[in-house]
Image (cartoon, grey):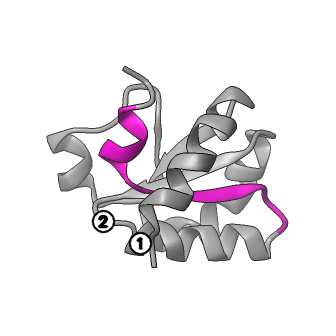
Amino acid sequence: MFSQKDAAENIQEYLNKGAVVIDVRTIAEWNEAHIEGSKHIVLNTIPENLDVIKGFQKPIIAVCKSGGRSQSATDFLSQNGLDVINGGPWQQVAQFLD
C-alpha cells in the first residue's frame, strides 16, 4: 500500500523531472477538488487511455483519495513500461506545488 515516507522522497524528484500528475478518482471526487494542471483519468479507464498517457512522454505521478487506486494505476502503468510513482492522496502531491 501507499507509504507516505517513500512517496515524499520521490514526489519532488518527479515534479522536478516535469512529471504529469494523473488523478484516478471519480468525477464527483475530482469536481470537489483537485490539483490544478493535473490530468483526470478515472482508474477503470486507464487501460483504454494508455496511448494518451504514453503520449505525455513524461514521468507520471498517480494520485487518488488515499493511495489505493493510485497504486493500482501505478502497477498497471509500470507493467506497460511507463516511469510512474504512486503519489498517494492528491493532497500529498499538492503540498509540493504550493
For numbered disc 2, what is the local secondary structure? loop
At label 2, the amino acid type is Ser
The image shows residue 96, relative to residue 75, as above or below, that is above
Residue 26 occupies quadrant: bottom left
Considering the image in quadrants, where does the N terminus appear? bottom left
Q: Mark 1 highlights which residue?
A: 69
Q: Are marks 1 and 2 in contact (CB under 8 Å)?
A: yes
Q: Quadrant of the C terminus?
A: top left
Name the mark nearer the viewer: 1 or 2. Answer: 2
- Residue 47 position in % (x across, y down): 62, 71
- Residue 47's tag is none
Who is closer to the viewer here, 33 or 50? 33
Is residue 88 inside the magenta stretch?
yes
User: Around disc 2, counting alpha carbons within 10 Å, would you say few (fewer than 14), some (14 to 19), or many (20 or more)?
Assistant: some
Q: Residue 85: within the magenta?
A: yes
Numbered disc 1: secondary structure = helix
Q: Eyeballing the image, is 52 above or below 3? A: above
Q: Tell me the residue that label 2 is attached to.
A: 66
How crowded pointer 1 is (Cα within 10 Å; few <14, some 14-19, many 20+) is rated as many
Residue at figure coordinates x 20%, y 53% from the top left = 29
Q: Is 35 located above or below residue 60 in the figure?
A: above
> Going by the image, does 63 lie left or right of 26?
right
The quadrant holding residue 43 is bottom left
Could one spot residue 24 in this view of the protein?
yes
